[in-house]
Amino acid sequence: MASVSSLGAGTSLDLDTLYTNLETAEKTKLTTITDQQTTYNSKLSSYSKLQSSMAALETAAAALTKSTAFSATAVTSTNTAFTATTDATASTGDYSVDVTQVAKAQTLISGSVSSNSTQLGATTSGNSRTLTITQPGTSTPLSITLTDSQTTLSGIADAINKSAGNVSASIIKASSGDYRLMLSSKSTGTDGDMTVSVTGDDTLQGVIGYDASSTSTQNMSVQTASQNAKLSINGVAIERSSNNITDALTGVTLNLKAASTDSSGETLTVSRSIDDTKKTVNAFVTAYNSLKSTIASVTKYTAVSAGASQSSSNGALLGDSVVRSVENSMNSILTSVQGGSYSILAQLGITIDPSTQSDGSTGALTVDDTKLTAALTDNPQAVSQFFIGDGSKTGFATQLDSTLTAMLSTTVGKEGIIKNAEDGINTTLKTLSDSYDKMSDSIDATMARYKTQFTNLSTLVNSLTNTASYLTSQFSSSDS
């Protein structure tokens, strides 16, 4: 908006002050719009917080609709030859596990070399040769091009390690003037056995070439022979290349450590675990209470004296119909009765606390761990039935998840109440922005008109003043 100065200059009229007062009065029309914008932006921010809390609760509820949440298992035996972990697909029971041998990786070592920095290969015309290491369990051989200077033990080891293949290399100094190149497979079992060849340099081939199938090409020797892991589970013989066995028992991962010291093996005990289920249930309770806290924050009311203006600390969604709809839906599901041995949350030790929490919320959930533990121990299937139901229309968690999903939906044509509320506010904000621009333009036009009028008035007053002065001067001359 253009600035104005020195209106009424040369006159007794204080047009500058008058103009400023008129401008201030006009701008109050913008303040009304900006106040509305602030209010609606606060609502939008509060809807975002509400949406986040609802989404967190939906995630927690969805976790309780999975059967795996109620079928967790754990290893309860203490074993020395192996360790084991389980997932929800494991069957409970005792298993006899006898580890005959653990898997080992092959290690090859070269003959003695006087220096680790002496070039071992022949000087080639192209200044290169190819080192190839193949392994049965690796589909693509490790192929490395070596320059003449890389044919030292250090150069070979460095090139192999930089290739990031399935083989590692190191140099062993046995004594002064006695260096060895050691190659180690990164994979255990016979599938990791190495065949080493050098093409384009027969001299280097004669130093590090190795082929177990050819007696004439064994210039390196086997320091550690590979072997597969061997064990039996309930008398069934099993052989694998790795000590990490994931496919012998469904849902059980075995990590072999050593051969069993007892000829009869060890007992692996898989039992039902309720700890993971309790964590999932408690996560739901935490998410629900967090939503209640968010609602209390966005609908906060601060009492004021009769006749006084509402407190500026009130929540942006105080009295909002969308929030009431969310609360009503949550309360309806929370108090719903399910079919089965457990029909209400209270039977699982989950109850509503009617007291007001420190954050101002009411109706928070509390968990009686003893009662929940007893229900999960005595009748886990009934607890699962309570939460999951038929997985479509019945079941506490199923109903809660479906309701929240619908409320949070952003799918075109299936927008939930949060999306609809946000869209409505954004439309209003767009209208207010347009109104602000129009009003600002109108004020600019009005003030420009005032400026023109004041300038014309100032000019007229100055003209009349000059005329009056002239006439006064003429009359004074005539009298004399």
Image: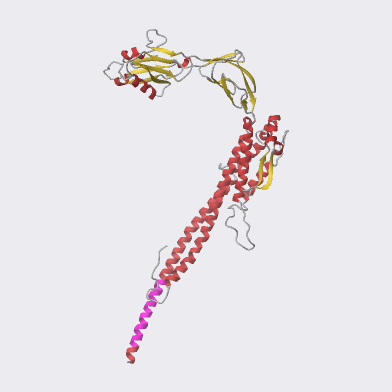
Residue 44 in the image, given as x and y percentages of width and height: 55, 50
Q: Residue at 61% across / 36% down in the picture?
A: 62
Query: In the picture provided, is 296 more to the left or to the right than 229?
Result: right
Q: Residue at 61% across / 62% down in the picture?
A: 308
Whether residue 31 can be seen here: yes
The C terminus sits in image quarter: bottom left
Of all residues, the one furthest to the bottom in this rendering is: 480
Residue 465, magenta (yes or no): yes
Of all residues, the one furthest to the top in this rendering is: 215
Residue 260 in the image, given as x and y percentages of width and height: 57, 15
Residue 89 in the image, given as x and y percentages of width and height: 61, 25
Residue 324, magenta (yes or no): no
Q: Where is residue 376, by image quadrant?
A: top right
Of all residues, the one furthest to the right in this rendering is: 341
In magenta, the rendered stretch is 454-474
Relative to 337, is 240 above or below? above
Relative to 292, is 475 above or below? below
Query: In the picture provided, is 104 more to the left or to the right than 295?
Result: left
Along the line of sight, the residue nearer the viewer: 432 or 220: 220
Q: Residue at 60% across / 44% down in the picture?
A: 290
Along the line of sight, the residue nearer the viewer: 133 or 478: 133
**Main secondary structure type of the part rendered in magenta:** helix
Residue 302 in the image, given as x and y percentages of width and height: 62, 56
Query: In the picture provided, is 249 more to the left or to the right than 220?
Result: right
Relative to 117, is 442 above or below? below
Relative to 446, is 123 above or below? above
